[in-house]
Image (cartoon, rainbow, N blue to C red):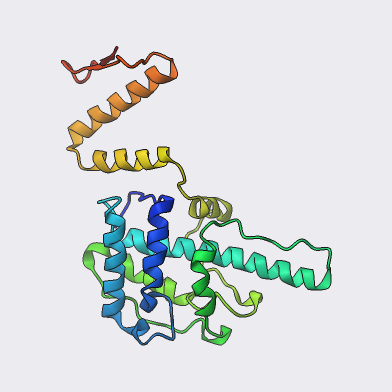
Amino acid sequence: MADNCVFFPRKLLKKFITLYRELPCLWDRKSVAYKHKQKRHEAISKLTELVQEFDPSATRVHVLRKIESIRACVRREYKRVQDSRRKKATNPDEILYKPHLWYYDLLSFLFEAGLPHSEQNEEVEGSTNDNAEEEEPAFEQSMDTFSGNMTGAPESFTMPKMFDEDPHKTEKRHCTEIEDEYDAIGINVAAKLRSLPSNMRIVAEKLINDVLYQAQMNGLNSSSVIITTDPFKQVVI
């Protein structure tokens, strides 16, 4: 089971959604490949390889979770849009809701891939089980469950209960994306820390914290260096 977080900066998420769109076996119930476990397995592998270009620690579970996340966010925005249009129909003064999700339009292809409400609970087999990634079938089954919820009457939207937690916290976590260079730096540093031996990672984290502390205290300048004679007694000068 993957227990670490993998961040998706905007550049990666755009590529992720573009590739996802090219893999209808993961989202289009009308596609012949949709019920082919091997094709779905291969499709998730392609997405995983893409994410690993940005974060080598990424796994299939991270990819499946991200797919759930972006679909949940877009579905929530879509429902708000439909609710707003319905109110507008009865009240001309009503201001139409505009989606705040920057990738909303990128996932518009999902709006055309839905099925009638009566077919939403159709069971579709997940991809090939992998003992190393035991969570994968559960996440793919969940994807199947709400794959068709993007179109039709707004009241047909249902959100599977995947986690027992505060929905407001879940929404904030799922729908907040990384957007500046500092997040990218953090991702880069995190990837390097993960590749270090345990003892070196502890020292590196301490040094990073020491440097940040000195910076907050205005103690750094262009001549600042780290003395490394004793890794546990560092001095930034």
Residue 16 versus residue 150 in the image, above or below: above
For the question of whether residue 65 can be seen, the reply is no
- Quadrant where the C terminus is found in the figure: top left
Answer left or right for 26 relative to 202.
Answer: right
Residue 49, quarter of picture: bottom left
Expressed as whole percent of the image width and height from the top left, the position of residue 209 reads: 34, 25
Expressed as whole percent of the image width and height from the top left, the position of residue 119 reads: 52, 86
Residue 89 versus residue 95 in the image, above or below: below
Q: Residue at x 54, y 50 (%)?
A: 172
The one of 155 and 48 positioned closer to us in this rendering: 48
Residue sitting at the far front: 222
Residue 223 versus residue 157 in the image, above or below: above
The one of 93 and 72 positioned closer to us in this rendering: 93
- Quadrant where the N terminus is found in the figure: bottom left
Residue 67, quarter of picture: bottom left
For the question of whether residue 235 can be seen, the reply is yes
Total numbered badges shown on the rendered structure: 0
Q: Residue at x 53, y 79 (%)?
A: 112
Q: Residue at x 42, y 64 (%)?
A: 17
Q: Residue at x 44, y 20 (%)?
A: 216
Expressed as whole percent of the image width and height from the top left, the position of residue 74 reads: 54, 64
Expressed as whole percent of the image width and height from the top left, the position of residue 43 reads: 30, 72
Answer left or right for 116 relative to 45.
Answer: right
Answer left or right for 14 relative to 228.
Answer: right
